Image (tube, rainbow, N blue to C red):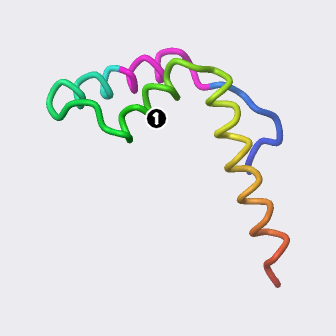
């Protein structure tokens, strides 16, 4: 069951993802995908907007599905 209220990820998970981003960038340089992940890790509003975007996509699919 999905939540209808936004709950941010635990800080430990965010920090772990940021570490992965930093390791990736040290090997391959800054890429567009790493820039977006870095933004996700460092901006709570960005994470909330991304969550809302995914909810809207899921809701649009549900309303167009015939059971």
**Extreme bottom residue here?**
66
Q: Is residue 17 magenta?
A: yes
Residue 8's quadrant in the figure?
top right
- Side of 52 relative to 33 (left or right): right
Q: Residue at x 72, y 28 (%)?
A: 7
Residue 37 drawn at (x, y percent): 44, 33
- Mark 1 nearby-residue class (10 Å; few <14, some 14–19, many ≥20): few
Residue 36 at what x, y percent from top left?
46, 35
Q: Would you name the residue on which mark 1 appears?
A: 36
Image-based side of 63 in relation to 14, left or right: right
Examine the structure image and report whether residue 27 is included in the region drawn in magenta: no
Residue extending furthest toward the left: 27
Q: Position of residue 45 (x, y in %)?
A: 68, 24
Prevailing secondary structure of the magenta residues: helix
Horizontally, residue 22 falls left or right of residue 13, namely: left
Q: Is residue 60 above or below residue 1?
A: below
- Residue at point 79% right, 79% down? 65
In screen coordinates, is 65 left or right of 31?
Answer: right
User: Which residues are drawn in magenta?
Assistant: 9-18
Find numbered disc 1 in the image and state the secondary structure of the residue it sits on: helix
Residue at the image point whose x is 82% and y is 35% from the top: 5
- Residue located at (79% from left, 69% from top): 62
User: How many marks are shown on the rendered structure?
Assistant: 1
Quadrant location of the C terminus in the rendered image = bottom right
Above or below, 41 relative to 51: above
- Viewer-side residue, 14 vs 43: 43
């Amino acid at each position: 069951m999905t939540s209808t209220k936004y709950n941010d990820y635990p800080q430990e998970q965010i920090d772990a993802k940021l570490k992965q981003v930093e390791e990736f960038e040290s090997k391959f340089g800054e890429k567009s995908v790493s820039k977006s992940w870095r933004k996700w890790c460092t901006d709570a509003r960005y994470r909330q907007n991304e969550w809302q975007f995914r909810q809207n996509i899921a809701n649009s699919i549900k309303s167009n599905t015939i059971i």
